[in-house]
């Protein structure tokens, strides 16, 4: 038994009190885990664009005060009633979506969109009782994506925790719990390029570069990067991309240019921007007869995607993916093993490191478009 099991833990958390304002380091009380919940000590976390988007509260209902954070790695401190697959001391990755193991999606080999634990950006409480596990002087603080890793301790549903190899360095594999796995899985699990394939990646942020990393691992012979920000091109070379296209420099639709330089189109394309125009380009740049485009970026829910039906009739395929089609508990441990076996190169994504006390600098880096992933050491 942990010495703190069943007790309220007082710890430091970076609390967002209002939209777009710097996070404030506060002492918070973290309640014990309830049924099917786990309390973990967060060792390392990183900042993802999803945290930034909801912190800015652009285009959605704001929910403050709140503790953000969802890319992280930690160690189990205590478990609630009914938790069978995790124990104190286990090394885990918290994930913004989950795997209950019982619903139709979890039982299907073709889906990872759990009915019970699917991502919910509006919920700021735990599922079991509709209450928050965080408070300051009795005032509840809202959760974020069921993870809230910008806190030294957090409570997560057991179905949203992937138990991983205890030898894996937590300060590196923490970034596998969201964006990197999303891009990697989009390529390896959905696009599935054959060795020698040509692959186009739209958007060269962390997710797009992870998609390119997947293409490199799969043995693609030619990876083309498309981005309107040429400052990203040099960094992208580390991920196997050696041809670049800036759509702003084209006097015609970029898909036409790509089709021309690839003798009719690429074998696979992965769209990682969320721009509808980029989605159309990604679909229309694949080769007729066998080309496959995968949509990863998330557009506004009311956006419309339009293309000519003949593009489909001519044998092009369009697919979407959520978290790279990885089931969090079942599949994420194998992604960690890809890193441990030196197949996946995680270090390339880590461009900054900061102590927890300087977490607001990570937001500054992202707002300026500097770097890919910033690792935050929760014990500094």
Image (spheres, rainbow, N blue to C red):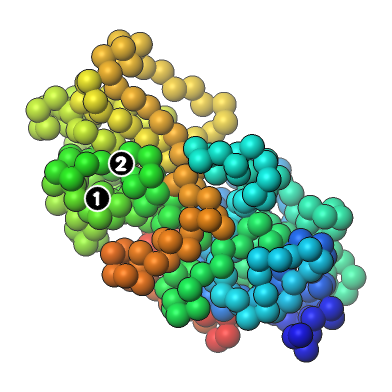
Name which residue lies at 40% across and 49% down: 185
User: Which residue ends up furthest to the bottom in the rendered image?
Assistant: 3
Residues marked 2 and 1 touching at CB (< 8 Å): yes
Q: Position of residue 52 (x, y in %)?
A: 55, 56
Q: Is residue 157 above or below residue 251?
A: below
Q: Residue 329 appears in which quarter of the rendering?
A: bottom right
Name which residue lies at 64% across and 49% down: 101
Residue topped by disc 1: 218
Q: Position of residue 198 (x, y in %)?
A: 18, 39
Residue topped by disc 2: 192
Q: Nearer the viewer, residue 162 or 296?
A: 162
User: In the rendered image, is residue 50 in sight?
Assistant: yes
Q: Quadrant of the N terminus?
A: bottom right
Choose the circle earlier in sequence order: 2 or 1. 2
Q: CA distance from mark 2 to mark 1?
A: 8 Å
Q: Is residue 334 left or right of residue 147?
A: left
Neighbour tally class for label 2: few under 14, some 14-19, many 20 plus, Cα within 10 Å: some
User: In the rendered image, is residue 346 in sight?
Assistant: no
Q: Is residue 284 left or right of residue 265?
A: right
């Amino acid at each position: 038994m942990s010495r703190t099991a069943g007790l309220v833990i007082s710890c430091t958390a970076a609390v967002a009190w209002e939209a777009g304002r710097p996070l404030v380091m506060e002492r918070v009380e973290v309640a014990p885990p309830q049924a099917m919940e786990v309390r973990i000590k967060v060792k390392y976390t990183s900042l993802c664009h999803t945290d930034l988007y909801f912190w800015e509260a652009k285009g959605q209902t704001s929910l403050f005060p709140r503790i953000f954070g969802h890319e992280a790695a930690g160690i189990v401190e205590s478990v609630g009633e009914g938790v069978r697959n995790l124990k104190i001391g286990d090394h885990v990755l918290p994930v913004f979506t989950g795997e209950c193991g019982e619903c139709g999606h979890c039982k299907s080999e073709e889906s990872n969109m759990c009915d019970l634990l699917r991502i919910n950006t509006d919920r700021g409480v735990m599922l079991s009782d509709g209450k928050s596990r965080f408070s300051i002087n009795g005032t509840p603080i809202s959760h974020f994506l069921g993870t809230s890793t910008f806190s030294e301790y957090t409570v997560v549903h057991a179905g949203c925790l992937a138990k991983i190899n205890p030898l894996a360095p937590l300060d590196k594999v923490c970034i596998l719990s969201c964006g990197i796995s999303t891009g990697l899985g989009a390529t390896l699990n959905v696009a599935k390029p054959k060795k020698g394939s040509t692959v186009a990646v739209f958007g060269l942020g962390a997710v797009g570069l992870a998609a390119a990393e997947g293409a490199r691992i799969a043995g693609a012979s030619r990876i083309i990067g498309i981005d309107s920000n040429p400052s990203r091109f040099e960094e992208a070379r580390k991920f196997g991309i050696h041809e670049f296209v800036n759509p702003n420099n084209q006097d015609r639709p970029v898909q036409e240019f790509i089709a021309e330089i690839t003798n009719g189109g690429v074998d696979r394309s992965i769209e990682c921007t969320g721009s509808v125009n980029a989605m159309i380009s990604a679909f229309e740049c694949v080769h007729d007869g066998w080309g496959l485009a995968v949509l990863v970026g998330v557009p506004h829910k009311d956006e419309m995607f339009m293309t000519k039906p003949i593009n489909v009739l001519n044998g092009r395929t369009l697919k979407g993916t959520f978290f790279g089609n990885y089931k969090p508990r079942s599949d994420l441990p194998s992604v960690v093993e890809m890193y441990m076996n030196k197949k996946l190169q995680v270090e390339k994504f880590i461009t900054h490191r900061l102590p927890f006390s300087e977490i607001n600098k990570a937001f500054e880096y992202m707002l300026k478009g500097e770097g890919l992933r910033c690792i935050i050491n929760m014990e500094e």
